[in-house]
Amino acid sequence: MTTTSTQAISEALHWRYATKRFDRTRKIPAATWACLEEALVLAPSSFGMQPWRFVVVTDPAMRERLSAAANGQTQPVECSHFVVFAARKGLDGADIERHLARIAEVRAVPAASLKGFGDVLSGFTEHARRQGTLDGWCARQAYIALGQFMAAAALLGVDACPMEGIDPAKFDEILGLPAKGYGAVCACAAGYRATDDKYAQLPKVRFRAQDVILRA
Ligand SMILES: Cc1cc2nc3c(=O)[nH]c(=O)nc-3n(C[C@H](O)[C@H](O)[C@H](O)COP(=O)(O)O)c2cc1C
């Protein structure tokens, strides 16, 4: 594996910021975007369940509607690529079966050898369902993908804006997500900052490392 340098990572993480205004004229090159999609696909999730869908919205009219459903924020229309992170609603046995079948296929193992794992998954998700926490658990997985996507974008010199200031119900309706069994959780605009985005110049506000990193 080729590793990157501590300096490269530090520079990218300081360089990135939640971009408010994108340069409409600049589009992410196909190879760069393919890498960012790979970052989404390769995101880790609890038990590897991947209870998500990433909707890459290209249709301009749809992007206008999503902007309106995001409190009028302009990122959905101005950015190069707009991704909606959707999480599975009401995850069930079929999701578990699909996951197990994929493991058997990719790792070339007999499905029967995965029965124990399947039982663990069924037990865990059934418990979460009874507790009313299952959909929230799926939504949290989507945020892991969001974080990985943003970090990858920064390393590639692509600007991004994570967005939770959206109306999930309206996003769901616009994208037809409920019929697919998914619900919008958050979104991310990606592209290149506009030269006049004043947020790019603001110093980053973070608590001191010693206040947030505890040592035990
Ligand atoms: C989950 C999440 C949701 C966010 N939602 C929005 C949003 O809807 N609109 C926006 O302009 N910024 C949004 N932000 C950006 C944050 O305000 C920003 O990341 C934070 O102030 C730190 O600044 P920085 O990312 O520029 O370093 C969101 C960030 C996160 C992580």
Image: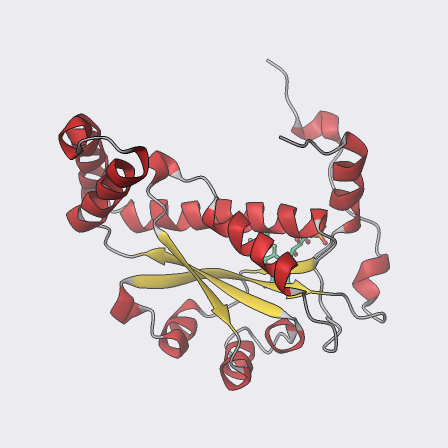
* Above-or-below relation of 187 to 43: below
Q: Position of residue 99 (x, y in %)?
A: 26, 43
| Residue drawn at point x = 57 percent, y = 50 percent | 149
Colour option used? secondary structure
* Above-or-below relation of 128 to 20: above
Q: Nearer the viewer, residue 120 or 133?
A: 120
Q: Is residue 153 left or right of residue 129?
A: right
| Residue drawn at point x = 53 percent, y = 76 percent | 58
**Image quadrant for the N terminus?**
top right
Task: Answer with the quarter of the image where residue 90 lies.
Answer: bottom left
| Residue drawn at point x = 28 percent, y = 57 percent | 89
Q: Position of residue 175 (x, y in %)?
A: 39, 74
* Above-or-below relation of 134 to 24: above
**Image quadrant for the C terminus?**
top right
Which residue sits furthest bottom? 61
Q: Nearer the viewer, residue 196 or 210?
A: 196
Q: Is residue 40 left or right of residue 81?
A: left
Q: Nearer the viewer, residue 2 or 204?
A: 2
| Residue drawn at point x = 66 percent, y = 30 percent | 212
Task: Answer with the quarter of the image where residue 213 lies.
Answer: top right
Q: Position of residue 53 (x, y in %)?
A: 39, 58
User: On the rendering, which quadrant does ligand 1 occupy?
Assistant: bottom right
Q: Position of residue 169 (x, y in %)?
A: 38, 71
Q: Is residue 154 left or right of residue 69?
A: right
Which residue sits furthest top? 216
Figure label count: 0
Task: Answer with the quarter of the image where residue 11 lies.
Answer: top right
